[in-house]
């Protein structure tokens, strides 16, 4: 059915020629409420937590279902957030809040387009200019020229730029519909803890098995690390041997320029041949030794 979106913002219909009744008073924004709002805003990643607490403190109910209450809470939220970013003091922030609420109340009190843009500008100037001083008491709620310039810019973008929308929302009767949907939801019974399904003996066996598996995994990891280390060692040896052989081959291909070079060349060539023979012999012995060690390890594991 048709209803006003916010009962507390709808004054009783005035008699002919009488001024509309003012909206009922709301709790003021106190320094305590302001401090609690900033604390909630900083402590929670979800801004709705701070918005809900702020609405509760200012007695603005049903912000998620009442369009006007929701828009008022959003307006206050954004104004307080702006004030802190602009470096305003708590008293200055309260003053900004009061100016904003005066603008919304004026939209709600005037039917239709009777509250014009010029009226809104005049109201804003009459509420903010008395608070401007050449040497302002910022802790007392007064503004410097720089402060009031920032506040004016904020209201220009956040209120006056959307004045027609604000006026429509706050002065026109709105249609609301309520829908209720009922659903049956089945919840599974909570699962019993695992120990309830095992006897003490079975649970001990499970723990022992898990310990054995963990130990086996540890041993396998150690063996894998050793194999990787050995493979790297052999790779480095092969790389060094290849480099040395390449140098020896290059040296062997060079023709000695002097008798001393010829002697040195002959000696190095002979040593290279001897080294190659020794390396081949030691490679065979090392292979045989590793095979014996592997057999012994298998025998020890079998025991």
Image: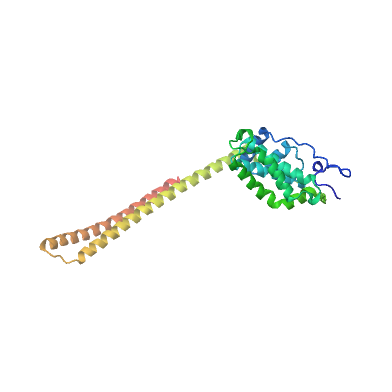
* Pick the front one: 279 or 119: 119
* Pick the front one: 224 or 203: 224
Quarter of the image where one finds residue 53? top right
Quarter of the image where one finds residue 94? top right
Q: Position of residue 164 (x, y in %)?
A: 74, 52
Q: Position of residue 257 (x, y in %)?
A: 13, 65
Residue found farthest to the left: 259
Total marks drawn?
0
Residue at horizontal 30%, vertical 57%? 240
Q: Is residue 42 left or right of residue 183?
A: left
Residue at horizontal 67%, vertical 49%? 158
State the scheme by which the image is colored: rainbow
- Can residue 228 be seen in this snapshot? yes
Q: Position of residue 97 (x, y in %)?
A: 68, 40
- Can residue 65 be seen in this snapshot? no
Residue at horizontal 67%, vertical 41%? 128
* Pick the front one: 81 or 251: 81
Residue found farthest to the right: 16
Q: Is residue 250 left or right of residue 169?
A: left
Q: Position of residue 77 (x, y in %)?
A: 67, 43
Q: Quadrant of the C terminus?
A: top left
Residue at horizontal 27%, vertical 57%? 279
Q: Is residue 102 left or right of residue 135?
A: right
* Pick the front one: 38 or 172: 172
């Amino acid at each position: 059915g048709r209803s006003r979106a916010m009962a507390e913002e709808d004054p009783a219909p005035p008699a002919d020629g009488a001024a509309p009744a003012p909206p009922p008073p709301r709790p003021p924004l106190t320094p305590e409420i302001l401090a609690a709002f900033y604390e909630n805003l900083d402590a929670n990643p979800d801004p709705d937590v701070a918005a809900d607490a702020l609405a509760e403190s200012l007695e603005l109910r049903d912000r998620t279902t009442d369009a006007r209450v929701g828009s008022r809470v959003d307006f206050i939220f954004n104004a307080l957030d702006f004030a802190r970013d602009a470096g305003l003091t708590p008293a200055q922030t309260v003053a900004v809040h009061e100016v904003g609420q005066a603008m919304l109340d004026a939209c709600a009190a005037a039917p239709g387009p009777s509250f014009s843009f010029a009226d809104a500008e005049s109201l804003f100037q009459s509420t903010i200019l008395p608070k401007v001083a050449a040497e302002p008491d910022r802790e007392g709620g007064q503004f410097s020229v720089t402060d009031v310039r920032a506040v004016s810019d904020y209201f220009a973008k956040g209120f006056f730029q959307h004045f027609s929308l604000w006026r429509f929302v706050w002065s026109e009767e709105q249609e609301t519909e309520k829908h209720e949907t009922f659903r049956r939801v089945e919840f599974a019974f909570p699962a019993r803890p695992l120990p309830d399904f095992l006897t003490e003996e079975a649970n001990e066996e499970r723990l022992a098995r898990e310990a054995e598996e963990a130990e086996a995994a540890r041993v396998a990891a150690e063996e894998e690390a050793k194999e990787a280390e050995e493979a790297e060692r052999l790779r480095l040896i092969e790389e060094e041997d290849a480099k040395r052989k390449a140098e020896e081959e290059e040296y062997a291909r060079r023709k000695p320029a002097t008798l001393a070079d010829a002697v040195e060349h002959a000696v190095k060539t002979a040593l290279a041949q001897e080294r190659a023979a020794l390396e081949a012999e030691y490679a065979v012995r090392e292979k045989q030794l590793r095979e014996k060690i592997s057999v012994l390890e298998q025998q020890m594991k079998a025991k």
